[in-house]
Amino acid sequence: MIKTARWAFQLDRHDVRSTVPAPIRAMLQNGLLDRAFQEALRPEFLFPAIADSSPWMGGLGDTKTFTRKGLLAPVTTPITGSDPSVATYSIEQWSVTMDQYANSVDTNMLISAHALASKYVADVQTLGINAGQSLNQIARNKLYAAYAGGRTWCTTAGGSDTSIIVQSVAGFTHVMVNGVPTPVSASSPLNVTVEGVANTVTGVNTGTNTLTLGTARADVVGDYLIASNAPTTIRPTGDTAYDLTTSNVATFAHFRAAVTRLRKMNVPTVNGYYVAHIDPDTEAQLFTDSDFKQALQGRVDSPIYRDLSIGRFGGIDWVRNNETATLLGGTGGNVTVHRPIVLGAGALIASPFSETGTLLSGTGVEDVPDISMINAAPGVDVALIVRPPQDRLQQNLATSWSWVGDYGVPSDSLANSDPALFKRGVVIEHG
């Protein structure tokens, strides 16, 4: 009777561990290993959820311009004669640019097979988190560039000249000319105030954060610059984040002021409430405010944000969001300034490429790679692309995500005869 030999593949005998990269060796250890990868700490992907979706077709680098019309002025006096006067209304525009965002990982399927937990599955999960976090921050950065722009301070002292180096040039690069965003220039200057004195910006160097002024002046560190069309921002004190200290904490009164501003601008709500994105530090400070705690007693649960919401009260859906932007402010440049934002409907427009999942249709090779559209964040679908192995042993698999599109922020420059741009949100700054 012939006995069949029984054997097992042993990592200590067949030295695979020493041939793989060090970060992967832990998965091939000889001791016990959990068969499932545990998820890493990750943020929630909340900023894309506020965006209205407007898919479009276009090539990379193409720009799409949206147009929004204003209203006719109310007529409160009777006409003279038999015909009324001819009225006109203004328009405003904003643009999005078709750009591609992507990332990729390679998986050696032989190594994945040796690991107790599938490295391929872990790679795909990690790639999905990366896609969601990337698009979340793209949407966040677009919002803050608009709603926190037009207000900055001088960072470098200098003699009397027309150049001033500032903390940020966001909100100073364009001026509205007949409703069209136009680059700032000598022929299209942006009106500003510098330490309360009227001036103009006639040029911008985004690489060095330098503004060219129409009138020469001597610069002092901390001097504030405010554009004539700067969005409304709220802080406990001062004109910019430079004036804040750690004692300038957030209170419920700041958020009431934000709601008041949005209501005065007739900004529509999101299912009956505005949405406040706050980080843990803002939340902790609010819970020391007696007005906030009293208002919290009358809260109702949010059916939209569920576990992420503190509740609904004060006209606001209060949402915990660790990805809320901060910046370094204070006179020493070492104060972490938190910037919760209160938003209404229509504050952000998502403009994805509409046919990402069908790019290979009709080519005859559409079934070679596996292309799936995956919901990586609320309202955001990305392409998950699995490319077949290209090596001779058919072991190295490439997995990628791709999203083509842009986020746009409507300026609402024509609304309510108010000079401020970007009226659908309010940024609150505190130490």
Image (cartoon, rainbow, N blue to C red):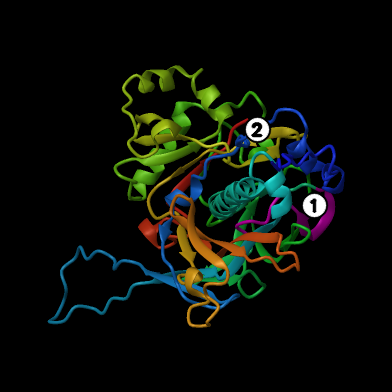
Task: Tell whether position 236 is magenta.
Answer: no
Q: Residue at x 47, y 55 (%)?
A: 422
Comes first in the chain, label 1 or label 2: 1
Q: Residues within 10 Å of mark 1 (few under 14, many from 20)?
A: few
Q: Amino acid at mark 1?
A: Ala
Image-based side of 413 in relation to 147, left or right = left
Toward the left, the furthest residue is 82
Q: Quadrant of the C terminus?
A: top right
- Can you identify the residue that label 1 sits on? 218
Residue 202: give x, y in percent of width and height.
68, 67
Left or right placement of residue 285 versus residue 5 in this view: left
Q: Which mark is residue 106?
A: none
Residue at left 76%, top 56%? 164
Q: Nearer the viewer, residue 350 or 420?
A: 350
Q: How far from the left and from the top, in percent, is residue 306?
A: 38, 34
Residue at image point 75% right, 28% down: 31
Q: Residue at x 36, y 50 (%)?
A: 265
- In reply to whether residue 160 is colored magenta, the answer given is yes
Image-quadrant location for residue 290: top left
State the residue position of label 2: 244
For the magenta stretch, what is the residue range? Answer: 156-172
Label 2 environment density (alpha carbons within 10 Å; few <14, some 14–19, many ≥20)? many
In the rendered image, is residue 420 in sight? no
Q: Residue furthest front?
A: 1
SS assignment at label 2: loop
Asked if residue 300 is positioned above or below residue 167 in the image, the reply reads above
